Image (spheres, helix red, strand yellow):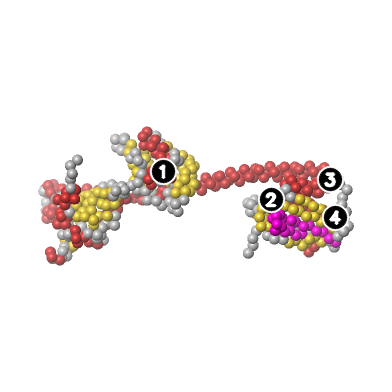
């Protein structure tokens, strides 16, 4: 290729040319342009075209819209006919001079391939238009020059109509709830990305960039291979609820789940020129479904455990009860205690229960003036909630039948504390003022169940004392089994 001085070529072109940047500021003009607009490069360089040649009317909006299309799409745009008045220099009498033009706008890229400038080739058709305006003959009698201008005006009118339709369709695509993008060429260069797509990728500007450059994090996730396959074969590819890691606006990788499809874009000859991307961000729906599945699995597990607990309670109650009526009453009482614990857990979606709330529920049907309960704001996990509820039920039932709550004078003092050394939760149950109690000759179901629950379920301890003033016991629950201390301001 010969060593051509393109700066000299630009300077010697007889047709008017100028170059502006993305802020519409003049970067370069050739002498033909200087003569056409009656301004030198020194007068306009660095200034916005719309400051030098202001026009708030239809023509000004049309010119600005053409610039915007070129910078947005990277494609050449033509204005076949546009009236655009320009100010006449003071040396030539001042005022405004009515002019008519045709213009071609061409995108120019910088070293990085980003569209940074716009080249305008302008043709002044004012004289031809004036010939048409001066003519009074029918259209078919116009001179070739005036017919040319008439056709240019008709073409410009049709062009504007098509642009209006195109702009309307573009707005529809831009505002569509699903994400849409258009990729061109084997490198999959973005030529369009709607608002939903831009939000999906963290607000990044991708027009004019290849996917590998604009979204480097998708490498190795299988999407580039699918795009290559669609571009080379024309076969559609896609997925439902597909996991992808995308960079957020904060620069962090976030997990998203997408329904999407890649479809080939073909030209009029049937050749594949790009890929059309469309889809929906289903992240929240997929996460909700996963959470529901997790809850269902957890529910199934808890139902099985609850049924096993009920079965054990039923078997042991029937075995220990002296008659069916007693068995029925004891069984119903134990089921009610289990139900109360479940109700408390349901209020927090089976997350936790406060010790104070559990004590209040389990002892609510006894005379509150004879019961004192106190302790720190301890939080129990679901397993500890069920276990402690069953133990409290057995203790309160025994107290009502045989202990301090069976008469009129007895009292119950219930307190709990957290050991500062090992973090264990210790619950003290102390009865006083009731009948004299003695250690039983054999352990009943209640005693066996409480011991089994505390040791087997919670890996804790259950210690009983039959003292002169009444029955007493202490429950010891390791920190790992009960949960945590709730800090209250």
Closer to the observer: label 1 or label 4? 4
Other residues around mark 4 within 10 Å, as few (<14) / some (14–19) / many (≥20)? some
Residue at numbered disc 1:
278
Q: Which residue bears the numbered disc 3?
A: 321
Residue at x 19%, y 48% (from the top left corner): 6
Q: Earlier in the sequence, mark 3 or mark 2?
A: 3
Describe the element under mark 1 as helix, strand or loop.
Answer: strand
Q: Taken as a whole, is the magenta stretch helix, strand or loop?
A: strand
Q: Separation of disc 4 and disc 2 at Cα?
A: 27 Å
- Please give the residue where the numbered disc 2 appears in the rendered image: 481
Q: Secondary structure at mark 3?
A: loop
- Residue in view at x 40 percent, y 46 percent: 215
The quadrant the C terminus occupies is: bottom right
Residue at point 61%, 46% (across, down)? 295
Quadrant of image for the N terminus: top left
Q: Residue 328: give its label.
A: none
Which range of residues does the magenta coloring cover? 414-433
Front in this rendered view, residue 228 or 165: 228
Q: CA distance from mark 1 to mark 4?
A: 76 Å
Label drawn at residue 466: 4
In space, the residues marked 3 and 1 are separated at their CA atoms by 69 Å
| Position of residue 362 measured from the top left corner of the image (x, y, whole percent) | 74, 55
Tell me, yes or no, whether the highlighted magenta stretch contains residue 429: yes
Q: Is residue 473 left or right of residue 158?
A: right
Give the foreground label among 3 and 2. 2
Pick out the residue farthest to the top. 233
Considering only order in the chain, which callout, 2 or 4, is on the residue closer to the N terminus? 4
Image spot of residue 218 (x, y percent): 43, 43
Q: CB of mark 4 within 8 Å of CB of mark 2?
A: no
């Amino acid at each position: 290729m010969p060593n051509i001085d393109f700066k000299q070529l630009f300077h010697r072109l007889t047709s008017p040319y100028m170059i502006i940047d993305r802020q519409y500021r003049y970067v370069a003009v050739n002498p033909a342009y200087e003569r056409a607009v009656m301004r030198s490069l020194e007068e306009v360089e660095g200034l916005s075209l719309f400051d030098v040649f202001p026009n708030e009317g239809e023509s000004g909006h049309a010119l600005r819209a053409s610039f915007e299309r070129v910078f947005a799409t990277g494609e050449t745009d033509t204005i076949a006919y546009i009236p655009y008045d320009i100010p006449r220099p003071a040396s030539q009498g001042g005022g405004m001079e009515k002019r008519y033009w045709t213009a071609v706008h061409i995108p120019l890229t910088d070293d990085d391939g980003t569209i940074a400038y716009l080249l305008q080739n302008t043709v002044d058709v004012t004289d031809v238009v004036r010939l048409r305006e001066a003519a009074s003959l029918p259209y078919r009698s116009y001179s070739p020059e005036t017919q040319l201008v008439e056709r240019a005006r008709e073409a410009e009118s049709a062009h504007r109509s098509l642009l209006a339709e195109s702009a309307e369709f573009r707005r529809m695509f831009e505002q569509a709830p699903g994400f849409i993008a258009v990729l061109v060429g084997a490198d999959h260069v973005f030529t369009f990305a709607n608002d939903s797509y831009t939000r999906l990728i963290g607000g990044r500007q991708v027009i004019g960039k290849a996917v590998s450059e604009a979204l480097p994090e998708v490498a190795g996730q299988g999407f580039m291979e699918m795009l290559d396959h669609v571009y080379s074969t024309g076969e559609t590819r896609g997925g439902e609820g597909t996991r992808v890691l995308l960079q957020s606006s904060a620069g962090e990788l976030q997990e998203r789940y997408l329904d999407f499809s890649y479809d080939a874009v073909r030209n009029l000859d049937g050749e594949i020129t790009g890929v059309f991307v469309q889809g929906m961000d289903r992240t929240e729906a997929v996460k909700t479904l996963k959470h529901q599945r997790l809850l269902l699995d957890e529910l199934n597990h808890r139902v099985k455990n609850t049924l096993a607990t009920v079965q054990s309670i039923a078997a042991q109650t029937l075995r220990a009860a002296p008659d069916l009526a007693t068995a029925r009453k004891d069984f119903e009482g134990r089921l009610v205690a289990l139900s109360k614990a479940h109700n408390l857990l349901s209020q927090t979606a089976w997350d936790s229960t406060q010790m104070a709330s559990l004590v209040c529920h389990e002892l609510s049907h006894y005379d509150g003036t004879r019961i004192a309960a106190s302790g720190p704001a301890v939080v129990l996990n679901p397993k500890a909630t069920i276990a402690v509820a069953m133990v409290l039920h057995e203790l309160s039932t025994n107290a009502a039948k045989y202990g301090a709550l069976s008469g009129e004078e007895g009292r119950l003092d219930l307190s709990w504390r957290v050991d500062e050394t090992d973090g264990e939760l210790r619950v003290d149950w102390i009865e006083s003022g009731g009948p004299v109690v003695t250690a039983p000759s054999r352990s009943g179901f209640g005693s066996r169940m409480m011991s089994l629950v505390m040791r087997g379920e919670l890996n804790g301890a259950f210690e009983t004392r039959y003292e002169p003033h009444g029955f007493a016991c202490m429950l010891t629950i390791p920190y790992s089994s009960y949960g945590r201390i709730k800090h209250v301001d």
